[in-house]
Each structure stands twice: as structure tokens, then as C-alpha cells.
Amino acid sequence: MAGADRGSCWFSRRDGEPRTLCVLIHGAGGSEKDFAAAGRSLARHLPRVYAFDMLGHGCREACADLGHERLVEDGLKATLEAARLSGASTVVLVGHSLGACIAARIAERIAGDEASGVGVAGLVAAEMVERASRDGLEGMRRALAARPKGFDDLREATAWALRVGMFRSEAGAREALAGMLRPADAGRLAWTVDLAATEDLWSGWLEGHTARFLSLRAPRLLLLSATDNSDPALLTAQMQGRFAVRTLPYAGHFLHVDAPRPFAQCVVEFLARAGVIEAAAAAGCAWDGGPCAE
């Protein structure tokens, strides 16, 4: 790992190589720690890999306004600053769930601003199909209502998350939960973000994602834990070959946590096929030890 600061992490920042920066954007309630294992795998093949905590998440201070406008402005600033620090001329945005929506909006902003001096080389949207996500909002409400308010320690939180199927990898769950929880009263751990309190923002987070994803001119990958044909616009565009699709059926919603090496392989191979990175950079990008191992 090239270096880490509070609320952000450089998995690699190598000079003298093709100047493309890969930015990893977590989902609602998560943190840059969601990408701990996947980021390490990506760094073996990509010269610049960076992850950051979104506004109000992880190590960042609590924020009363987590609307998409604030998240996009904050994420755009972080992305452009990381590009400046690493000398990158292009960025690949990799977002998970809500992070995919934010990544698409950031890509749209960068593509429409020639003055930024940065281009968009690719977009990876993991676990984000707008129509399916809207259909699943009621299930999300029920899940949030049922989850514990806090835990005595990280071990208890990890055991719960594996038991209810939130994660499928014990090692990945521990790393991800370390960024999702923070110390609270009486020494217990509480959720960093009260997702139930953000319900009024959910529709705004999702609004227009499919149209935005399809309108971008950069190479795009839709990465899912299961095949989803619920969105006619996406299905039509997929049949026309306008973007790539890969599935990791042995992983759950947090596919980058459950299967970090396969996740990284999908991203690296996509970038090689799209000509964003040289094919040689993808050589040896494979996983071992089972689908959920790291």
C-alpha cells in the first residue's frame, strides 16, 4: 500500500507509468475500507489506485446533508485532487451501489469540463441497476429496521453480519465493518451512518442513473452479483454491445468484499479489453483459494 491518510487510501501511486488513476467509491454507509482487499489486488496491475470516504462516512465528520449534490461535489473534489497529486491525466471510476451512482455523476461532470485537464477513461458500476434498486427499497427499509443499533465489539458485529448474509467473507467483513462502525456510548460500536434516517434521499441518489450510465462515452462495465434483466433500457443497450457485463454469482451485494480477487480480475480485464491499460498489465490477474478468499 503506497500510503494512507485518515479517510483515504492510496493502494498504489507509481511514477513513470501510464497516467491513469483508478478511483474506488464505496456505497451508502460504507467507507474506503470496503475496498481494502480489492484495492490491494487492483494495485498489482494498475499504477494508481485510490479510495476515499464519502462525505459523512468512515473517518469523515458526521454530516446532516448527504444529498446527491453534496456527495457529488465532495467526490469530484477528491477525485480531481487525487489526479493532481498522482499526475494522472485520465481517471477510471469504480463505484459500488450508491457509489456507482456518484461515480457516474462525477464522470459526467469531468467529461463536461475540459478545463479540469482530466479525461474519463472508464466507468465500472458494481451492483447498481436503477430499476431493481428502486424495487428493493422496501426490503432495504425492513433490513435496516431489523439490524442491531450497535455491538460490543468488532467480533460480535462480524458474526452478526455473516449470520444474516450481509457479507460472505469473514476477513472481508472485519475490514469493511471497521469503517462502518465507530465507538459510541458505553464503549459500544454504533453504525457511522444512520441509513434509515436517509430514506428521504434514496430516490435522489438513484434518479437518472440508467440514462446517465448509458449516455457516457467512455467504456463502461456493469458488474453484478446476479444477472438482472429488470431494466429494459439496460437490456436493450447490452444487446447492442454498448457496455460490458460481468457477474460474480458466488458473491453477495458486497461483491468486492466477498470476492475481492475476482472483482479485481473483472475490472482489470475490462480495462485491458477496452484499451485503457496495456494487455500486458492484465497478465497474471487471476485468483486462487476459492471464490471468497483473499
Image: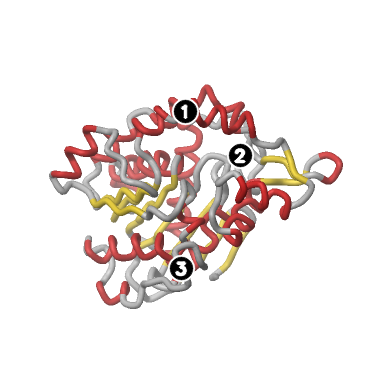
Q: At 22% from the left edge and 64% from the top edge, which residue is drawn? A: 273
Residue at the left extreme of this rendering: 240
Quarter of the view holding residue 155? bottom right
Report the mark closest to the observer, 2 or 3: 3
Of pointers 1 and 2, the one earlier in the residue sequence: 2
Quarter of the view holding residue 130? top left
Q: Is residue 119 visible?
A: no
Q: Which mark is residue 56?
A: 2
Q: Where residue 125 appears, x then y in whole percent?
A: 36, 47
Of pointers 3 and 1, the one earlier in the residue sequence: 1
Q: Label 2 sits on what residue type? A: Gly
Q: Is residue 134 visible?
A: yes
Looking at this view, is 197 or 278 the one in front?
197
Report the mark closest to the observer, 3 or 1: 3
Q: Label 3 sits on what residue type? A: Gly
Q: At 78% from the left edge and 41% from the top edge, which residue is drawn? A: 184
Report the mark closest to the observer, 1 or 2: 1
Looking at this view, is 257 or 192 the one in front?
257
Residue labelled with disc 1: 137
Label 1 near label 3: C-beta < 8 Å?
A: no
Q: Find numbered disc 2 in the image and state the secondary structure of the residue it sits on.
A: loop
Q: At 60% from the left edge and 28% from the top edge, which residue is drawn? A: 196
Q: Label 1 sits on what residue type? A: Leu
Looking at this view, is 39 or 72 the one in front?
39
Q: What is the crowding at mark 1: few (fewer than 14 residues within 10 Å), some, or many (at least 20)? A: some
Q: Is residue 104 above or below residue 65?
A: below
Q: What is the crowding at mark 3: few (fewer than 14 residues within 10 Å), some, or many (at least 20)? A: few
Q: CA distance from mark 3 to mark 1?
A: 32 Å
Q: Where residue 170 appears, x then y in whole percent?
A: 60, 59
Residue at the right extreme of this rendering: 186
